[in-house]
Image (spheres, rainbow, N blue to C red):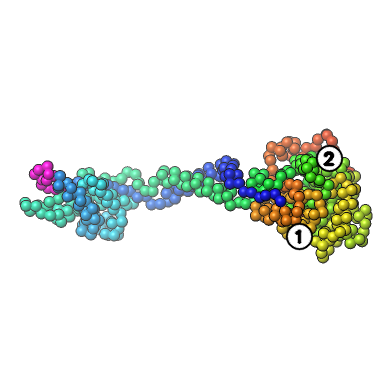
Amino acid sequence: MAAMKIVGTTRSARITSTLTKRWYVVILAAAIGSVGAFALSYMVTPIYTSSTSLFFSLRTGGTATDINQGSTYTQNQMLSFAQLAASSVVLDQVVKDLGPETNTNTNTIDLRRSITITTPQNTVIMDINVGTTDPNLSAKIANSVAKNLTLAVSTLSPIDKANQSGVVANIIEPAVPATFQSSPDKKKNAILGGFFGIAASILAITLTVAFDTKVRSVAALKSMTDYPLLGTVERNRASNDIRPVVLRLPNGPAAERFRQIRSGLRFAAASHEMRAMAITSAIPSEGKTLSSLNLALVMAESKERVLLIDADLRRPRIADSIGFEGTIGLTTVLVGDVSFENAKQRFGTTTLDILTAGATPPNPAELLGSTPMQNLIEKAKLEYDIVIIDTAPVLAVADVTVIAPLVDSIVLVVDSTKLRQAQLEQASEALGTAGAHVAGIILNRIKPSKLHDVYYRDFTGKPSHSKGKSRVTADSMATAGTRGTRGKEFE
């Protein structure tokens, strides 16, 4: 059994590769975030802030020591003065100054919410900031707070020997109506929205790749298993023609992919006998049946004697996909009703013979593991150059584990859009337990290559036809190929 592995650096490479390929998503997210933040800022009622500053000091101080001590005393009292500025003692007078004609809804609570008092550390300066929806009102409130605070300080601070307030607050700079709104800051929010969009899109892409365990690419497959990759097959365009792609487009890119897989299997045969191979998948509908058909067809192109057996006795599909009679086949041969010579069917004028599944039996696993099945495979290996057996999915039923000891190798078809890492690991473990030799994996339904597609198509968009060696002859397609209605997805 080939050891399974997970390489963290490969996943990081996948994330980096995906981010590189999806750069336009990041840019689009940045644009949406920026425009969205700007639009929201535009909808929010603008706030205008006016500010004024006060300077606090002791009224008297004869010596440098007195002045220094007075400054220290005043600094220590700044927090108290700040609380005084936001107290009812000051704000009640501010409400009176505003008058009912300014804002009938203005009260102490509203004023306190609109005022911000700051006292820079180690200074005797107080900044009063007032923000409202009216710039003139903001300035008026700030100046009123400053004025009434100076009066409150004079009233509440200690009295000196001259019966005068010990602390004096002077207005440094009166507040004026703001020309521009202070919030929301549309430009700043637009920039922040853009950065948020970038961060959100990168996070989304990273999480998608990190938690996506599907075998979507060759790199992902290599990070999950040590099984050799025999080749890849691209997704085919939707078509009402349900025949194998080697029949529909014999000179197309998909057909060439299967010819490359044929070469890969020949290299694999150099180190391990490959006279009889079973083609399966981990789960249903990964394309194993059509892969079996296409491989059998391209192998027959080289004049090799090829036998294709439909051993998926639970969901047989080979007969339907090429228009053969399927009532007589493997099951009828195994139970002895029909001889192998009478049950097999020649595919047109090619060197390909096909043994369909036959009638559906009540005990598929027992038939496939029987002595007649073993004898049939041994006989076929003597008569044919290559025997291809289409079997049920590994994780669906136990048929593959029964057939595995009877064949030389197993070829696993993996659908890049469906199979997940855990399922691949389970299938690998099941095949290893059965003692199967896995020749390799066919990665099916990968994203088509645009460059590869253009190479095989002329300017009309139709498949190009080379004048070289014929692949699958017109006679063979006429005698064996059929067209059917779309709606069935063959395994």
User: Three-letter amino acid code at disc 1?
Assistant: Ala
| Residue 323 in sight from this viewpoint | no
Q: Nearer the viewer, mark 2 or mark 1?
A: 1
| Residue 214 in sight from this viewpoint | yes
Q: Position of residue 45 (x, y in %)?
A: 38, 52
Lateral position of residue 251 relative to residue 443, left or right:
right
Indicate the secondary structure of the residue bearing disc 1.
Answer: loop
> Which residue in the structure is indicated by mark 1?
398
Q: Could you tell me if the residues under marks 2 and 1 are in contact, i.e. CB atoms within 8 Å?
A: no
- Residue appearing at x 57%, y 42% in the figure: 16
User: Three-letter amino acid code at disc 2?
Assistant: Arg
Q: How many marks?
A: 2
344, 106: nearer the viewer: 344
- Residue appearing at x 69%, y 43% in the figure: 448
Residue 61 among those drawn in magenta: yes
- Residue appearing at x 18%, y 49% in the figure: 74
Lateral position of residue 377 relative to residue 43, left or right:
right
Q: Position of residue 54 (x, y in %)?
A: 21, 47
340, 382: nearer the viewer: 382
> Which residues, given as a range, are shown in magenta?
57-67
Q: Position of residue 138 (x, y in %)?
A: 29, 50
Mark closer to the chain start, 2 or 1: 1
- Work out how far the residue at label 2 is from the one at label 1, CA to CA, in angstroms: 36 Å
Residue 471, numbered label: 2
Figure quadrant of residue 358:
bottom right
- Residue appearing at x 85%, y 40% in the figure: 302
Residue 116, numbered label: none
Whether residue 297 is situated above or below residue 468 in the rendered picture: below
Q: Position of residue 141 (x, y in %)?
A: 25, 52
Indicate the secondary structure of the residue bearing disc 2.
Answer: loop
Badge 1: how crowded within 10 Å, few (<14), some, or many (20+)?
some
Residue that lies at the very extreme toward the left in this rendered image: 162
